[in-house]
Image (cartoon, rainbow, N blue to C red):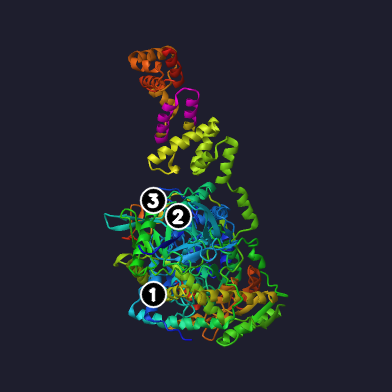
Amino acid sequence: MAHIIDDDMIEYVGILAKLELSEKEREDAKKDMGRMLDYIDTLNELDTDSVEPMSHVFPVHNVFREDVVENGDDRDNILKNAPEKKDGAFKVPKTVE
Amino acid sequence: MTEKEILSLTAVGLGKKIKSKEVTVLEAVKAVLGQIRSMEPDLNSFVTVDEAFALSQAEAVQKKIDAGELTGPLAGVPVAIKDNICIKDMRTTCSSNILSDFVPTYTAQAVENLIEAGAIIIGKTNMDEFAMGSTTETSAFGPTKNPWNLEYVPGGSSGGSCTAVASGECFYALGSDTGGSIRQPASYCGVTGLKPTYGTISRYGLIAYGSSLDQIGPVAKDVTDCAAILEVLASHDKKDSTSVDRKDNHFMEALTEDVKGLRVGIPADYLGEGLNEEVKEAVLKAAKILEEKGAVVETFDLGRVKYAIPAYYVIASAEASSNLSRFDGVKYGYRAKEYEGLHGMYKKSRSEGFGAEVKRRIMLGSFVLSSGYYDAYYIKALKTKALIKKSFDEAFAKYDVILGPTAPTTAPKLNESLSDSLKMYLGDIYTISVNLAGLPGLSIPFGTDHKGLPIGLQLIGDCFQEKSILRAGYALEGEHGYTMPELALKAINGREEK
Amino acid sequence: MSKQYETVIGLEVHVELATKTKIFCSCSTEFGGAPNTHTCPVCTGMPGSLPVLNKQVVEYALAVGLAANCEINQYCKFDRKNYFYPDNPQNYQISQLYLPICHDGYVEIDTPSGKKKIGIHEIHMEEDAGKLIHDEWEDCSLVDFNRSGVPLIEIVSEPDMRSGEEVIAYLEKLRLIIQYLGASDCKLQEGSMRADVNLSIREAGAKEFGTRTEMKNLNSFKAIARAIEGEKKRQIELIEEGKLITQETRRWDDNKESSYAMRSKEDAKDYRYFPDPDLPPVLISDEWISSIKERQPELRTEKMARYQEDFSLSEYDADIITASKHIADIFEAVTEICNKPKEAANWLMVEGMRLLKEHEMEPENMCFSPENLAKLIQLVDNGTINRTVGKEVFERIFADNVNPEQYVEEKGLKVVNDEGQLREAIQGIIDANPQSVEDYHNGKEKAMGFLVGQTMRAMKGKADPASVNRIVKELLG
């Protein structure tokens, strides 16, 4: 089954990924993604009906921290790399819900 | 000692000479800085070299060694760090424009461990942007070249770390390996690279690509160095929830040539179509050597090999699409100069800041997680991962070590890979499944092909069985081992003549 | 309106847990503080940082789930919810979708037609976002990550509620349970308890649900009640006009008493959830569950029973006192000091409740020290001041937490017990009111009351009423 990735799909994925592609990048992305998905479809040859999906490769569990405050005020460091800042906060374009 | 003699030493070798006062830390640092100055115009192994910092560390560490406070095998030895591992106050870019000015405010745990052991940090090495690539050509700061032949790629994504070690620009380096990013360039550059069992080395401070697959590891001149470095790097870190508390971190103990009775399996599926004949011969030669030394070697069917790459690209891209969403121009990194509104700022900053391969993987990852495709792609890939792990579990019920090639070929030429990404991905066919199963994998140099390019062998162990592959690697490396590329020797000789 | 409609309401309630540190890093959760002073690489999404789960978050979530009669997912995991927003530093929120910690529970509420169970679909753990401050000067927004990573539980109800009253009863019940567990202070105004209302309308008797909308930004019980009324009206009007209801998220503006749709082309609502690879699963053993149950603090019904048993409070009194965990705590602290449970209950129930109502305050905001109420009770009890003066002093304690002993001293409010002084004053009143004296002698008992009242007024309320009564009677003969 050959995957056809159309403009709408690329537009939609661009919204999800917050990427704006140039005309050429769009055309490349459509081809690339179609080819990759065709390739990924080879996984369908595998019978995985009775297989549990494995997200963590080792059975590590219950890794916890105790509820103790260890961090102090580190604001200057936290803001050090900010492209724009003001009044001890990160400055962004006007954002209203 | 002459600069040439110093630069021909391994990391552990240099450590011994420093301890015995035959070499000072400053001499070692100056030797690598000299080599960096000579080689960088050709190689481009480094994104950042911090000479002043290196020299100041040299002085401080020498004092501690003299005072008997630093006694480990790596004290005073210069190291280079892949540029996706954070070091406080040292620019860390992931070879991306989006982080070109990023200066971390904290240091990765792995690097903290090195500093504690007396390492001298020289700088940050070039890589494929965000570790996405197999050639170090996707770096925003230009490609790194293979020191054996400047027309060839060094492999990737830890290409900078591997060329730096191969050409004497440092004595060892840290890389990261998500699908083969340490082992494959190690193989192309003729150095030794180890990806430890997932969870062995803290990921805290490693800028994530595929979190469930990423692992930091050493790149060095030989197996002994790798074992020594791993002893320093391996630690249970409470800041990394996937860090494993390993009781036995004495990897140096494994370094004996005694492989009698060692059960070695060679996957028949690794020797089939696509494998270069010269690489295949090297694998078979290695098998013979191990057999002669008393190991039991046989071929077997590992199975499901061809499914590792598609499963990997689904999982790694999905995780990457989420991991890299934090680069948005708000808190750090690149922000577009002109934009309209919040979402305009996001889109422009990211589109201008990320390179083509990174965008390609973010798009793919966002797609496979999106509504309606999650089960068909992401869950299917996680199930495939479970099956691949099962294949390895079955193999390790019969064998202590799996032997095979690291990559199907030796290094390809520059500018040949990126035009066909699918073909490039296939170059990782032997390394990727090791990440999916969380296993340790070691690549050692094993001769060269007719073009004079290094060939690498891969040894894969069961989880937490680094000692088995280190031992097998140690037994094999005597046959070929590390040699310095002609170009690097020429640079040293050129300086000595002056 | 020709047809009969039924309102169907489900709630998503977010509760900030009372942990000392954030859910995935050891930054303080303390409220307030200058912007970004409670932050670190983890809660600001710095590259290379990793989350580590706060155990106390799991314990609080378990405690709430068990108290709300939930089943526990003994294997639970965290997932990433991916969306871009400046208050979300990683541009994904760590939450739980596939295996939330608790599911299928209920709480019981009282309705005019008796008890009703409101189903709880699930409870999951997640991290809070930062805060966006709008800067009018530069027409930009500023991001403060102090709240980023504060632990939340989200309690998702079944669509079991049919009116605003039921919603308020459900929220009050939840709040009480959580406050009793000590898992959160649940202050709506400060945002430590927030509710999103899912509402749909259907014709009475219909089986299918109508299209629902989700309403956000509800900061008080009153706002919730108004928003429900408003949305109900809006949807019925649409239906009556034959229009379709759009499934959407709406933001309630309590000042304008109306809502508007939050919509954007850039907002795809496709969160691409997947298991967080940085966080291993949580396994909850039977032993862990039993230890949470064993350590569970006394809940309201147990407290009520104990108050009746140990302090001989009436069921009615115990009910009122325990209706707020905070008031119950004050009650116990006061009783502990002065050992006068009935007095303590009376002051809190009568004067305390009256003042709360008068000032439109939540019980949580009653913030005087128990020592001062205990002192007041003793002052009245040992006759230093009379009850009328006591009420005045209580108001001062309630408002400014004054020390009653000092206050009574400074204002000269002590009861006058000087027999001579009293007699003199009363004689004066009798002399000045011959008509009342005559009325008294003619059998009008009321006249006696008038004279006592006049005396109290002359003494500025400080006289002991019993003594005044006795002396008036005596002097009238």
Badge 2: chain ID: C
Residue C373, percent from left and from top? 47, 32
- Write down the residue under mark 1: A12
Residue C283 is tagged as: none
Residue type (three-letter) at the residue carrying disc 1: Tyr
Range of residues picked out in magenta: C374-399
Which image quadrant is residue B89 in? bottom left
Which image quadrant is residue A58 in? bottom right
Whether labels 1 and 2 share one chain: no
- Write down the residue under mark 2: C167
Residue C222 is tagged as: 3
Disc number lying in front (1 or 2): 2
**Who is closer to the viewer here, B82 or B447?**
B82
Whether labels 3 and 2 share one chain: yes
Give me the residue at 48% from left, 55% from top: C152
**Who is closer to the viewer here, C237 or B71?**
C237
On the question of residue C17 being in view, the answer is no
Marks 1 and 3, how far apart in space?
A: 40 Å
Which image quadrant is residue B128 in? bottom left
Badge 1: chain ID: A
At mark 2, the secondary structure is helix
Main secondary structure found in the magenta portion: helix
Q: Is residue C398 magenta?
A: yes
Whichever of labels 3 and 2 marks the residue nearer the N terminus, that label is 2
Residue B344, percent from left and from top? 32, 68
